[in-house]
Structures are given as structure tokens and as C-alpha cells.
Image (tube, coloured by chain):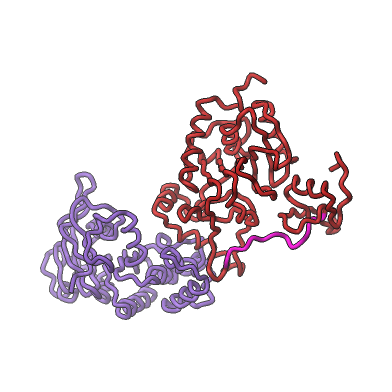
């Protein structure tokens, strides 16, 4: 078996300041990797570099493509990389507004990726949009409503449907539950967990919420000041933290 | 003639515009940037079309201007007079006699020939503009041929109205490559875009020129289960009886009276001169409107 994503010595600097440096890991098919750390620790920079939204200064991001096997996405031409972004990759933003077209109906939002890869039958596009709205628990009669008429939790679920409709193999998530209240968070996590299992997705989830990674992630990387300070199985890292910073992070969680 | 250089613009400017036109013809549907000049008329009144016409005109040309198909509206009359004064060229209202036709929002009903040039005035050349506000992004989408978004617009039309409700400025794909805004012509005119004449599009404020060479392949975007349809009012012209032309609806009084007339005034006049009379029309007399 080849790893779905192999990251080698990835580094990104902002001038003299370090965004992230020396990051290497493998992500296997069906695996969910969590990246935690306080704000400013470089986790969003890392995610942007992995997802092709920002060019790293050094390193390799090798993705196991459907057609040609493992290839360094940083050396791909831009059309190839953008094609990857709308077929095999998905990106779930923290703010649904960044990931949705607010002026386009829910159905159009879900259908966009289908049309971008060549779907040209209106009936099919609409049926698949309605099917996906159902899978993320949005009623079929909301298909023609704009995202502005949705609650925050629904917008986030719509964003997930819009991203997963083309059957991607790798999903990048940036704080997917940020800004939602806890009961909505719980249902969203439940939904994500179901989808990840059912579709055999691999995912990289950036968050500062340890409860989220405990529920979703198989493996965990802890970042501080742009470097990975600890990595391992989620339960192992959270139950028996080795690095001083991880210990601080775990002990800082409020107990209710 | 007058103190103006021929056709108002100086020779260097006309050369610059001709270079843009040649490039546009070489890459059908691609928007070529050009250094649009200030013209003695406000943006939105055809400054792009006027500059393209000025670059194409020669002293031997016969010039025709139409606005929404009509030769006698303010915009058409002003631009015709402008070139009468600054270029001294012959002008006409007859489509067949013109060698260059500048148009706003219509293609003449009478098929054009290989000896003619059709110049369009374009307000917004970017078909993706209302969906993607960033010029950087739309240029990238054109260069990478990422046109899925254009179909999102048509999808929205069908989901809201049950059919593709876009009735003008209907997006087309040129030679299987660039998606192009055909300027705000009614979609009735879209099938005519594949024609014998050269078609040049000038957008003055947006500083873009694009073009369709003769017999270039132009396909209107659609869905397999909602195919493109060229629509017109379900009527005959009330003046000339034509059943194949694009019609204007004219309100006659406050009591709901209306008539449908050809928007192409020259086409209507020539049909009436040939003896056709519509439901509310009077027999044609020379010199009477």
C-alpha cells in the first residue's frame, strides 16, 4: 500500500519569521490526522501549503494520484493542481462564507463542482444535489434557498456537501466546528465521522479543540512555533503527553 | 474635410487598436487589452465601438450605425454624424450597402457578407464578471478553461424559473475554447454569430477588444436536458408582417394598446417597400415613416 499523502521536510517562512519548518509525515488511505496547537503555531500555514493554496519555500507534498501514482503536487502545473482541488481534494473552511457562494442557491453550490468537471444534465445535477443535502441533513425543499437563509450549522453542513459531492479522497478541514455552539458541533462531528467512515476518506483536520481531534482523528500532531513537537496516536498523545507543551495543552482543557 | 485627423483618432492610436484587433482575430473570443482613449462621448455610449470603427474605416467605406436595431435613435444618429464630420465617409441606413456596421445590442436581420464588418459596442466584456468579481481570478479561469461557474448561472436560472431565463448577453463558447459575452444582443441573435462577416467587439471603459473571424464556430452554452432556444415574441410584425424577425413591443396608449414591430428598422422598411403589410400597417409610401 502506498501512502495517500507523503509530506517531506515542508517549510514556509514569512520573511525571517518561521511559518512552519521541518514537517514530515505520511497519511494513509482512510486515515484522519489531527493537527493541534495554539494560534500562531503554524498549523494554518501548514494546511495552506498542503492544500496548494500557498507555495512552501521548501519540501515536497507527494499525493497518490488516481492516474499516475505518487506525484509531487508542488511541481505540478497549475491546471493539474486546480483539477486535483476540484476532484480528489476538498477544503472545508472555518467560516462557511469563505467556502460557499453566498449569491447562489444551495443546489447550485453543491452542483458547482459537478459542473466544473463536466456534468451537463440539469436533472442529474439537481438529483445529486438533493441527495447530498439529505446526507448532510438539509431538507430537500431548501435546495433553492440561498446559504444566507441558513443557520451557521446548516451553512457548515452545506459546505461539507459541496465539497464531498465529487467523491474526493482527501479532505482538508480548517477548524470545521469553530464558532458553532456545542450541540450543533456534536451533530456536525457525528456527521463528519459517519461520512469519513462511509466514504473511506482521508482527512487532515486543523483545530485547537482537543475534543474534536479525540473524536475524529486517528493520529495527532502537536505544533508549537512552527515545528511539530509531538506526534502519535491520538489517544496516546492525549492520555500520556510527553512534551512539556503538550502536557500544558492537555491540562489546560476545562473540565465541566 | 475638417481639422480632425481622419476618423478623429490620431494614426498611432489607430495602429495600436488595429494591432489589438489582429490579435483578437487570431485568438477568437479572447479579450485583448488595449489602451482605450477618451472619446467625446460618455462611457457607456459606445466609446469602445467608436474606437474600433475609427480604426477600421477607410475613406471608401460606407458606414451604418444601429442602436437596438434602429437607425434613427439618438445614439445611432450621433455616432453616424460623428463619423460624417470627422471622417467624411458615406453613410447609409441600408444593411446591404454598408461596408462597416456599428451596432448596439442587435445583429441585423439581413445576412451579412464577407465584405462587411460588424462592430459591437460592449458594456461589460467579461461573461464571468457577475459570478466572480476579481479580474485576476477571471483571467485565470479563462487561461485554465475553468468554466463550470458559467453553468452555475444557467443552473440557477432553471431552478428559479423552470427554464434558462437569460434572454440577452447569453454566454457562448468560441471554437471550443473561450467563453465569450456576445454583448447584450438578444439570445434570438445568438445563432447568427456564426456568419460570413468579421465581428469585432469593443469595450471602451473596460479597455478590451475581442473578435469573431468569419465562419467561426460559436456555441451557446446549455444543458443536455435544457437545450439552448432562440426566443422571440410570439407575434408577427404589425407593420410589415414578418414572422421571422426580432420584435419590439411598443405601448400605444394607457388602455393597454400595444403593437409588435421589427426592431431592425431597415429590415422592416425594405419589407414594406416590397409590398408586405402587417396587421396595423399602412401601405408603404416613399419618404413617409
- Regarding residue B106, the answer to whether it shows in the image is no
Residue B136 shown left or right of residue B272 in the figure: left
Q: Quadrant of residue A87?
A: bottom left
The structure residue drawn at horizontal position 83% and vertical position 59%, both measured from the top left corner, is B256
Residue A238 place in picture, x, y as percent? 18, 73
- Could you say which chain is coloured purple in the image? A
Q: How many marks?
A: 0
Residue A241 place in picture, x, y as percent? 13, 70
- Regarding residue B176, the answer to whether it shows in the image is yes
- In front of the other: B154 or B242: B242
Magenta part mainly helix, strand or loop? loop
Residue A249 place in picture, x, y as percent? 19, 66
Residue A93 included in the magenta stretch of the image: no
The structure residue drawn at horizontal position 78% and vertical position 46%, both measured from the top left corner, is B270
Residue A194 shown left or right of residue B168 in the figure: left
Residue B37 shown left or right of residue A200 in the figure: right
- In front of the other: A43 or B190: B190
- Could you say which chain is coloured red in the image? B
- In front of the other: A180 or B94: B94
Region rendered in magenta: B227-238
Q: Quadrant of the C terminus of chain A?
A: bottom left
Q: Quadrant of the N terminus of chain A?
A: bottom left
In this view, the residue farthest toward the left is A242
The structure residue drawn at horizontal position 70% and vertical position 39%, both measured from the top left corner, is B97
The structure residue drawn at horizontal position 39% and vertical position 54%, both measured from the top left corner, is B144
Residue A157 position (above or below residue A227): below
Residue A7 place in picture, x, y as percent? 19, 62
Amino acid at each position: 500500500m502506498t501512502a495517500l499523502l507523503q509530506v517531506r521536510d515542508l517549510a514556509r517562512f514569512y520573511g525571517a519569521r518561521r511559518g512552519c519548518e521541518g514537517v514530515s509525515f505520511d497519511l494513509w488511505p482512510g486515515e484522519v490526522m489531527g493537527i493541534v496547537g495554539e494560534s500562531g503555531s503554524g498549523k494554518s500555514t501548514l494546511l495552506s501549503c498542503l492544500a496548494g493554496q500557498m507555495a512552501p519555500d521548501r519540501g515536497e507534498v507527494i499525493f497518490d494520484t488516481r492516474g499516475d501514482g505518487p506525484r509531487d503536487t508542488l511541481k505540478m502545473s497549475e491546471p493539474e493542481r486546480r483539477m486535483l482541488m476540484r476532484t480528489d481534494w476538498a477544503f472545508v473552511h472555518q467560516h462557511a462564507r469563505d467556502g460557499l457562494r453566498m449569491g447562489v442557491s444551495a443546489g447550485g453550490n453543491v452542483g458547482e463542482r459537478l459542473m466544473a468537471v463536466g456534468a451537463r444534465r440539469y436533472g442529474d445535477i439537481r438529483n445529486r444535489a438533493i441527495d447530498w443535502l439529505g446526507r448532510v441533513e438539509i431538507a430537500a425543499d431548501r435546495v433553492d434557498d440561498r446559504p444566507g437563509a441558513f443557520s451557521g450549522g446548516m451553512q457548515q453542513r452545506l459546505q461539507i456537501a459541496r465539497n464531498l459531492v465529487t467523491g474526493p479522497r482527501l479532505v482538508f478541514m480548517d477548524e470545521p466546528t469553530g464558532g458553532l455552539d456545542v450541540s450543533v458541533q456534536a451533530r456536525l462531528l457525528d456527521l463528519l465521522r459517519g461520512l469519513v467512515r462511509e466514504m473511506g476518506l482521508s482527512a487532515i483536520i486543523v483545530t485547537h479543540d482537543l475534543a474534536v481531534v479525540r473524536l475524529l482523528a486517528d493520529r495527532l500532531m502537536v505544533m508549537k512555533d512552527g515545528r511539530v513537537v509531538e506526534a502519535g496516536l491520538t489517544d496516546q498523545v492525549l492520555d500520556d503527553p510527553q512534551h512539556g507543551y503538550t502536557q500544558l495543552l492537555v491540562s489546560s482543557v476545562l473540565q465541566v | 474635410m475638417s481639422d480632425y485627423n481622419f476618423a478623429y483618432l490620431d494614426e498611432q492610436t489607430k495602429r495600436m487598436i488595429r494591432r489589438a484587433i489582429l490579435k483578437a482575430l487570431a485568438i477568437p473570443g479572447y479579450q485583448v487589452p488595449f489602451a482605450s482613449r477618451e472619446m467625446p462621448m460618455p462611457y457607456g455610449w459606445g466609446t469602445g465601438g467608436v474606437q474600433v470603427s475609427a480604426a477600421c474605416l477607410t475613406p471608401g467605406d460606407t458606414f451604418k450605425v444601429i442602436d437596438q436595431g434602429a437607425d434613427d435613435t439618438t445614439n445611432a444618429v450621433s455616432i453616424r454624424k460623428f463619423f460624417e464630420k470627422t471622417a467624411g465617409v458615406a453613410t447609409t441606413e441600408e444593411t446591404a450597402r454598408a461596408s462597416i456596421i456599428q451596432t448596439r445590442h442587435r445583429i441585423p436581420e439581413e445576412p451579412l457578407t464577407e465584405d462587411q464588418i460588424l462592430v459591437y459596442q460592449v458594456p461589460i466584456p467579461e461573461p464571468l464578471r457577475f459570478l466572480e468579481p476579481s479580474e485576476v481570478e477571471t483571467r485565470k479561469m479563462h487561461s485554465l478553461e475553468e468554466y463550470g461557474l458559467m453553468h452555475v448561472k444557467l443552473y440557477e436560472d432553471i431552478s428559479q424559473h423552470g427554464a434558462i431565463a437569460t434572454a440577452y448577453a447569453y454566454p457562448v463558447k468560441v471554437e471550443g475554447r473561450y467563453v465569450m459575452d456576445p454583448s447584450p444582443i438578444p439570445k434570438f441573435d445568438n445563432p447568427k454569430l456564426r456568419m460570413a462577416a468579421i465581428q469585432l467587439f469593443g469595450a471602451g471603459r473596460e479597455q478590451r477588444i475581442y473578435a469573431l473571424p468569419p465562419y467561426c464556430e460559436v456555441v451557446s452554452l446549455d444543458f443536455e436536458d435544457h437545450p439552448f432556444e432562440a426566443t422571440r415574441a410570439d407575434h408577427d410584425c404589425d407593420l410589415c408582417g414578418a414572422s421571422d424577425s426580432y420584435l419590439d413591443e411598443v405601448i400605444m396608449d394607457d388602455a393597454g394598446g400595444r403593437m409588435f414591430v421589427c426592431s431592425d428598422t431597415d429590415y422592416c422598411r425594405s419589407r414594406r417597400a416590397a409590398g408586405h403589410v402587417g396587421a396595423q400597417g399602412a401601405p408603404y409610401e416613399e419618404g413617409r415613416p
